[in-house]
Image: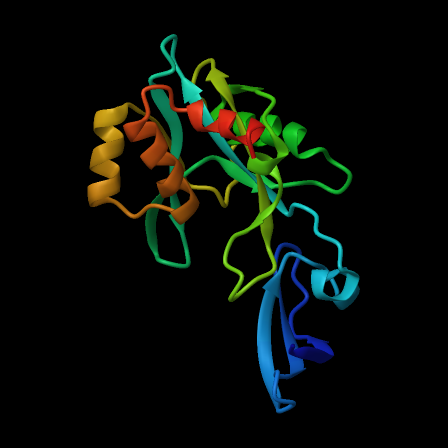
């Protein structure tokens, strides 16, 4: 098993930082590895503390009386200098329950009100986003959204279009657009399952 021998913090930013690791691989050979993290310092890194907490929350919600549309955001991202389709999402504030985070982020990004549903923890526990690059992990909250779309609460740095997509539009998006990977997996459920949240019942048997 590899070992982390030393951690050097390269950046000091409020939302994401780069850490330079001196490591030893399974054969005992030295090396370097770089990790991006939401942590403010080395002591907060999961590799230091051993504690896993959700950095963010991803919101999979259905809209409409028949629950036949899914709430998506088409958001500009600097990393690709382009727009990408995602679920509404955001960071969990210190001490904040991630279900409360989901309600807050949904309101801020879309203007809609989220009604979370209770699911087995197998579906909402924190999972890692891109472990080869970052220790970031996010919980997923499921629910139903209602209300009127509004951009009044968007931050200046956010460039977001809210999309209430039916199955026809979801099929087009998956074929033609850039889509975040977690979002794409869930959209396949939405596209193919008569009851999009039916898979959540599987947790009772797990």
Q: Nearer the viewer, residue 145 or 153?
A: 145
In the shown orientation, is residue 10 left or right of residue 43? Answer: left
Residue 137 place in picture, x, y as percent? 59, 50
Residue 128 place in picture, x, y as percent? 56, 53
* Residue visible at 38% across and 41% down in the picture: 185
Residue sitting farthest toward the top:
65
Coloration of the structure image = rainbow
* Residue visible at 65% across and 61% down in the picture: 13
Does residue 181 sit above or below 190 in this rendering?
below
In the shown orientation, is residue 41 left or right of residue 184? Answer: right
The image quadrant that residue 177 belongs to is top left
* Residue visible at 49% across and 22% down in the picture: 111
Q: Is residue 197 visible?
A: no
Q: Nearer the viewer, residue 92 or 67?
A: 67
The image quadrant that residue 4 belongs to is bottom right
Residue 28 place in picture, x, y as percent? 65, 90
Q: Is residue 73 visible?
A: yes
In the shown orientation, is residue 23 left or right of residue 80? Answer: right
How many numbered circles are shown? 0
Q: Look at the image and tell me in which quarter the N terminus lies.
A: bottom right
Does residue 132 sit above or below 101 in this rendering?
below
* Residue visible at 61% across and 44% down in the picture: 126
Q: Nearer the viewer, residue 183 or 152?
A: 183
Q: Look at the image and tell me in which quarter the C terminus lies.
A: top right
Residue sitting farthest toward the front:
205
The image quadrant that residue 11 belongs to is bottom right
Residue 148 place in picture, x, y as percent? 44, 15
In the shown orientation, is residue 114 left or right of residue 193? Answer: right
């Amino acid at each position: 098993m590899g070992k982390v021998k030393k951690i050097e913090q390269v950046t000091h930013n409020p939302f994401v930082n780069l850490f330079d690791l001196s490591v030893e691989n399974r054969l005992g050979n030295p090396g370097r590895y770089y990790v991006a993290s939401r942590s403010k310092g080395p002591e907060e890194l999961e590799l230091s503390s051993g504690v896993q907490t959700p950095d963010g929350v991803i919101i999979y919600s259905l809209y409409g009386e028949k629950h036949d549309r899914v709430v998506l955001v088409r958001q500009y991202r600097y990393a690709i200098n382009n727009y990408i389709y995602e679920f509404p999402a955001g960071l969990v504030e210190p001490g904040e329950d991630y279900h409360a985070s989901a309600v807050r982020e949904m309101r801020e990004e879309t203007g809609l009100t989220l009604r979370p549903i209770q699911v087995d923890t197998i579906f909402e526990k924190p999972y890692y986003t891109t472990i080869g690059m970052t220790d970031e992990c996010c919980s997923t909250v499921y629910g139903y959204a209602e209300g009127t779309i509004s951009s009044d609460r968007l931050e200046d740095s956010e460039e977001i279009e809210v999309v209430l997509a039916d199955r026809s539009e979801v099929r087009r998006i998956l074929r033609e657009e850039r889509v975040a990977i977690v979002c794409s997996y869930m959209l396949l459920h939405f596209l193919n399952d008569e009851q999009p949240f039916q898979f959540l019942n599987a947790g009772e048997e797990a």
